[in-house]
Structure formats: structure tokens, C-alpha cells
Amino acid sequence: MNFLPFDERKSAALLKAGLLIAGIAVVDWQIDLNIAFGLLYIFPLLIVGGVLPRWQIAGVALLCTVLADVFDPYKFTYNVALPQDVLMFSALAGAGLFAHEVRRNRLAQQQNVERLEEESSARRDAEEQLLFLIDSSPAAVFTAGTDGTILLANSAAGRLLRIEDNLNGRNLFRYISALRHVPLVEDPAREFRAEMQCKGEREDGEVFLANVFFSTYKTRLGARLAALVVDASEELRDREESTSQQLLAGSRLLANAVSHEVRNVCGAISVAHQNLLREGGLERNKDFAALGALIETLNKIASFELKKSASRLEVGPVDVREVLDALRIVLEPRAHEAGILVEWNVPETPPVALADRHSLLQVLLNLIRNSERALAAWPLKRISISVVEKGEHVSIVVRDTGPGISFPDRLFQPFQEGADSVGLGLYLSRAFMRSFGGDLRHDARVPGCCFIAELQSARVLPIDSEGVDDAAHKTAAH
């Protein structure tokens, strides 16, 4: 509880000050003694000093000085009374101004205290929210000192490392050894913020692939390291499994295509063999008979149908925009480094087509790589990717401003002379497209090089195909 008079409300304070001034004036008027009652006016001045501005305080001090002079029992003389009045006015005004400054300083201190309490409360709330965010994060969060000692770790960190006890005090470098090479310096200008993918080790010795996002910072106690760690093992397994499935599917397409070509050659050899047999003279020739047996055996091998397995492509409705977003993530950094301008013409409402997402992405990446190679030494470097939906078909058009195709009649043929690698890129790309009811074709009418990947719209029911094997036969037949 506060007993200071200037803490009262302004109206009550002024009333009290007025009553005191009136009371002192009455006492000074009625009591005729050689006593300076005017000094008692200091008390009402202390009261009004806490609620009035400076000029009003001076006015009240002047009023009290006049009252003290009026009720002074001695006659007023300039030589004596005037210096006394000046001293009394100075004393009264000084008391009032002193109370005013005390009041003002106290209010300022109260405001500072309130502001500090608000900042402290806001800081506590922010710390609580931050701690809740860190503790509820599915990613493992660590802070460590220069020697790798863990200072803070959330519950996800314990689950990641399979440690039920408190992680504080353990060595982070024991589990994420690559962080040992991050320089922790005291200079704030040399703070590091980066990410890396490295090997991690759990408490039981199990190794996992870790995506680590780390930064260094400086505190009054020294340099610190903050790291956010995510287990990417499942992502790696999915990626490798997807790559394996793509490789198996492509291998089956290629094997069936080669089988088809071998059957064609065997058919031609068999016709020649039968013609020679009809001409006579070679029936008893053992080498000729052996040749016929070899032709028959090779024909059987070429006619062998690969058994259908679980390595089928997962054909279903695919959001074309999502596939192009993934393509954009891969393409744009490389295109920027190569000085290639990439234009995207995708409708706001993305079409949904029937395809295998990973196979479609591989087809588009193969087309983009071909364009990048063609534009490497070309002055005008631009690639445009457009999506057109028309009726029951969705077309993805990949066009570049390169020199174009020298021999368009050789496109989609495997094992071409002069082609990069073994010349299977476009061949397998078209095989993939046809495996889920689409097609890949080259538009020679457009300047530069233009490929169109055609897909069936998801509004059309998928055909009941016999899987990747039949698609390979169809591709080889074309």
C-alpha cells in the first residue's frame, strides 16, 4: 500500500491541498504570535507538486506567499519583508517542484518496470513456444559446445538415436561424426549456415543416412553449434528401389525388343534354310542339319516370353503439375549454371493424366538432357515446356532453340552410330510412354527441336493392357 500524498487522485489531492492552505491561512490570521506559520504552506505544495504542472505549482507558491504576507502581524516593509517573501516563494516553489520531479521520476520508473515485465513476459512466452516447437518437432534438434557436448536435445533426437535417457552431456560427434569438421570460431563474421548429407550412427551401432542442417553462433560462454537432423534412410531406400524398378522395367523393355529383332532375323535365316533344303543336295550334310538345329534353338530363345513380375509400372492418375514441379527442382539450377533460359507454360488448373510418375519424370529428364547437350555450344539457349490438354489427351511439349535433329528418321532406334552412350534414351523413353498408353513423338515442323509426350487424360478409363511386356512388343513392332 502506498501512503505518499502525491499518489492520490488529482481531485482529492487538490481538495486536500486547498483545505490545508485555507486552514493555515485561518490559523495565521487568528493567532497573533511571532511564529512563521507561512512555512506550513510547504505541505500543500508537496501535495499539488505531484498533480500539477510546473507553472501552476509556481502560481500556488505565489498565492501561499501572498497569504503569508497578508496575515503577517508585522507591518510590511520593503527592506525586511521583500527578501523574506523571495525566500519563502523559493522554498515553497522548490518544494512543489521537488515533489513534481519525484512524481515524474517515479512514473517513469514504473513505466520502465512495466515495460521490463512485459518484455520479460514476452520473452518467457517466446521461450516456451520455442521449447514447445523444438520438443514437438519430428526432426531431431541438437545444440552443442565446441567439444561436441550436447547442451540441448529434443525428444525426437532421443528417438532418432534410440536413447531413452537424457542426451545432455553426451558427445554429438559420436553419433554425427561429420559435424566434427565444422569449424566453431568466436568471430561472429565467420558463422556457418549450411546443410549436408552424411552418415549417422545410433546408440546401438546401426548406421543411417542423415540430412543435417546446421549453423554456428556465438554466446557469452563461447561458440555453439545448432543442428537439425533428419533420417533420410527411408528416402534413400525408396529412391534406390524406384531406380531398381525403373532399371528392371527398362531392361525388360529392351530384352523384349531385342528378342523381337532376333525373331525377325531368325525368321529370315529360317526361310533361307528352307529354300536351300528344297533345292536338294544338303539333306545329308551334318553341318547343314546342325545349322537348322541352331536356328530352331535360337528362335525358341528369342520367342521366350519374360514372366510378368511385380516390377510393373504403377500406372494411375498423376498430377502433371507435381511432376513438372519435381522436374523444375532438378532442371533450373543446372539450366542457370549453363546459361539456359527455361520457360514454363502450365495452366493454372493442372491436368491429371494416366502415367507412372517416376517413369514420366525420367522421360522428361531424358528430353531435357538431350536439349542441354544440344544447346551447350549454341548461341541462343532457351527451353520451353508447355502443357496442353485437348479432349482425351494431355500433351507435354518440350522444345529448345538448338540446331535440331540431323536425321529425324533414325529417332527412337536403338544402337545408333554416333549417339551418346548406346543410343537407348529416346527408344526407352518412348517405350515407357507407350507402357502406360501414351506416346512420344518428334515434331519436325517446329524450328529447333520439339518433342511431344502424349498421355491419356485421367477422365479416360485405362486400357486393360498386358503390362510392360506387351508394350515392349508394340514398341518393337513400330
Image: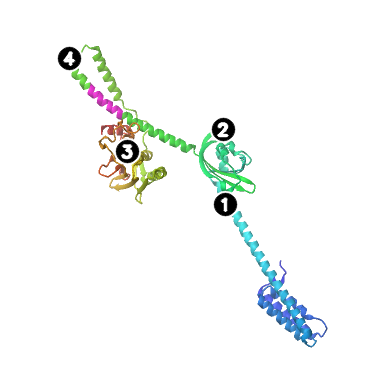
85 relative to 216, above or below? below
| Residue 118 appears in the figure | yes
User: Which residue type carries mark 4?
Assistant: Gly
Secondary structure character of the magenta stretch overall: helix
| Residue beneath disc 4 | 280
Badge 1 amino acid: Gln
Toward which corner of the image does residue 266 lie, by quadrant? Answer: top left
Residue interval drawn in magenta: 257-269
Marking on residue 205:
2
- Residue linked to disc 3: 433
The vertical placement of 130 against 70, above or below, is above
Q: Label 2 sits on what residue type?
A: Gly
Between the residue at mark 3 and the residue at mark 4, the CA separation in whole angstroms equals 49 Å
Labelled disc at residue 247: none
Residue at which label 1 appears:
129
Q: Earlier in the sequence, mark 3 or mark 1?
A: 1
Answer whether labels 3 and 1 touch (C-beta < 8 Å): no
In the foreground, 248 or 225: 225
Give the spatial CA distance, label 2 vs label 3: 44 Å
The mark nearer the N terminus, 1 or 4, is 1
